[in-house]
Image (cartoon, rainbow, N blue to C red):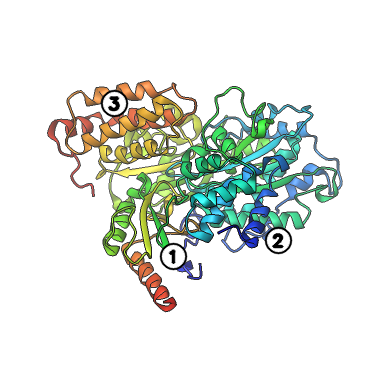
Amino acid sequence: MALDLSRFQATGRETCFHDRHVGAQIYAGLTGANWRLADYRARGGYQALRKVLGVDGGSPMTPDQVIAEVKGSGLRGRGGAGFPTGLKWSFMPRAFPGQKYLVCNSDEGEPGTCKDRDILRYNPHIVIEGMAIAAYAMGISVGYNYIHGEIFDVYERFEEALEEARAAGLLGNNILGSNYSFQLHAHHGFGAYICGEETALLESLEGKKGQPRFKPPFPASFGLYGKPTTINNTETFAAVPWIIVNGGQAYLECGKPNNGGTKIYSMVGDVERPGNYEIPMGTPFAKLLEMAGGVKGGRKLKAVIPGGSSAPVLPASVMMDCTMDYDSIAKAGSMLGSGAVIVMDDTRCMVKSLLRLSYFYTHESCGQCTPCREGTGWLWRLVNRIEHGEGRADDLALLDNVAENIMGRTICALGDAAAMPVRGMLKHFRDEFAHHVEHKTCMVPAYV
Amino acid sequence: MSLSESTKARFAREVAKYPAEQKQSAVMACLAIVQQEQGWVSAQAEAEVAEYLGMPAIAVREVTTFYNMYNQQPVGKYKLNVCTNLPCQLRDGQKALEHLCRSLGIEDGGTSADGLFTVAKCECLGACADAPVMLVNDRQMLSYMEPAKLDELIGLIRAEEGKVA
């Protein structure tokens, strides 16, 4: 396109280059202008890979040592599931004679989440380095980074970063003169939320519709092209270089037990300063909210969806007692998920909010499983009529029932992801839905 | 119209990323290239991509119809997708969509009479902290698009196109 639209593009100042990160490891020292290889090296980049390969003297780390370090770090998958990364890596069959694959899931489309985009566009080499180390640990020679199609400019930048790394001997054959080789490529999506699900992503990477696979077999035994495959989130890979340089124990210690390291939270919705905040695991939610400037316009906090749109909503009173880590949020009845924190103030109508989410899930259901394909549409139609003053007396019970019959009855987690917001809303804000049904009007007329 | 040599060269760069027997993996990229060059993905383009990659045309069609961003019919010269998902809705994403539609005199999903603009809501672009956000022709993401900036954008495009015509 000849037309220059750069004046409308984000500079990252608001979302990433602010001074409110605490103990940043992934976003540390970024300006937007220093994403290139030379800049990354000046920040100490690729030291971890050099250490693993033993190219600066000293002996190389063994794959077992690398995995042990990651296990000891308490690093858990940053894409949403929170599965221990070192354990996942140890599942890969070490002695498998054929090709194995490494895949980075950068298909960031969980509503509320925008952290991987800032990692990839402002610090792409940290992901490349993390992947190269992971591939070494699992004996993998080929990898792909599957990038959300909507952030095409980021995909193009990542391709540039790959070229830089190849030219510098950091990717390709005999990396840094060692006998270790790793080929890494970028692949883009083109608009499908479901491809963030790892087996749907693999189908998509194979050039098909992104419909999830039944598990087992798990990707570690039957993944890309039917070969053993490990898939991790962008932020997970980005955490690896720090762990190798500083040690797993140090990483663990900057979080809390069972929740190691820093985590990037996307603060979105009704806050003064929406953006990404990298802070130690276990930081109180109240502190994170304060960092984001508090609730927008000084209004009162009503509710928070703490882990991306699929996580059950929590009322303000519960949320204000939580710390931001997997265990605390789970104990409160929701999930940390991708770390997207959707903040809602006291002018927000929960029926209208759920209506938009329900539309999203029915729109993005891949259509493979009946409970999800039919159930998500049913949920949306129910919430739609409640919102528009046409709700019936037994609609809340019906919502419960439909959500109940989707949960656990589908191949992938999208079904659960569609049902959980409904259940969370009805658990904590049932009176609002009942008011809509009974009075045909909203309890919160200020909603615009 | 058959594939030009330059298009084939772009296809070849994508195919090279995958194992020789897995050319189909490049189908998403090839279709995105076709869309960038032709504005949409026609049945003929699908057939050409299928032939190039050695896969059935119906398998290409499955991809075109599954992923949201492929245009299955011609669209305006500038396709504007505005995210209205909940995090954006909380920060006036829906208002941005309505403002665009009103300014251009079209419905959500419609194309302006001069063929210059198509406007449609879309699902999460993964830039929620930048809301209201929009995507221009699949490849350029614009952030913090308040009504004044939307007006500026429309003015800029119209001025550019006036110059061309």
Counting residues from the start of the chain, the first of labels 2 and 1 encountered is: 1
Which percent across, then down, holds residue A402?
32, 24
On the image, which quarter does residue A216 sit in? Answer: top right
Secondary structure under tag 2 reads helix
* Depth check, front residue: B12 or A154: B12
Which percent across, then down, holds residue A325?
50, 35
Q: Residue at x 30, y 63 (%)?
A: B104
Q: Chain of mark 2?
A: A
The three-letter code of the residue at mark 3 reads Leu
Tell us which disc is closer to us: 2 or 3: 3
* Depth check, front residue: A45 or A249: A45
Residue at mark 3: A399
Q: Is residue B29 visible?
A: no
The three-letter code of the residue at mark 1 reads Phe
The reply, left or right, for residue A25 in relation to residue A379 is right
Q: Residue at x 49, y 25 (%)?
A: A411
Q: Residues within 10 Å of mark 2 (few under 14, many from 20)?
A: few
Q: Which mark is residue B109?
A: none
The reply, left or right, for residue B162 in relation to residue B16 is left
Which percent across, then down, holds residue A42?
70, 59
Q: Is residue A350 visible?
A: yes
Secondary structure under tag 1 reads helix
Q: Is residue B35 above or below residue A98?
A: below
Q: Chain of mark 1?
A: A
Residue at mark 1: A8
Q: Which mark is residue A38?
A: 2
Tell us which disc is closer to us: 2 or 1: 1
Secondary structure under tag 3 reads helix
User: Furthest residue to the bottom?
Assistant: B163
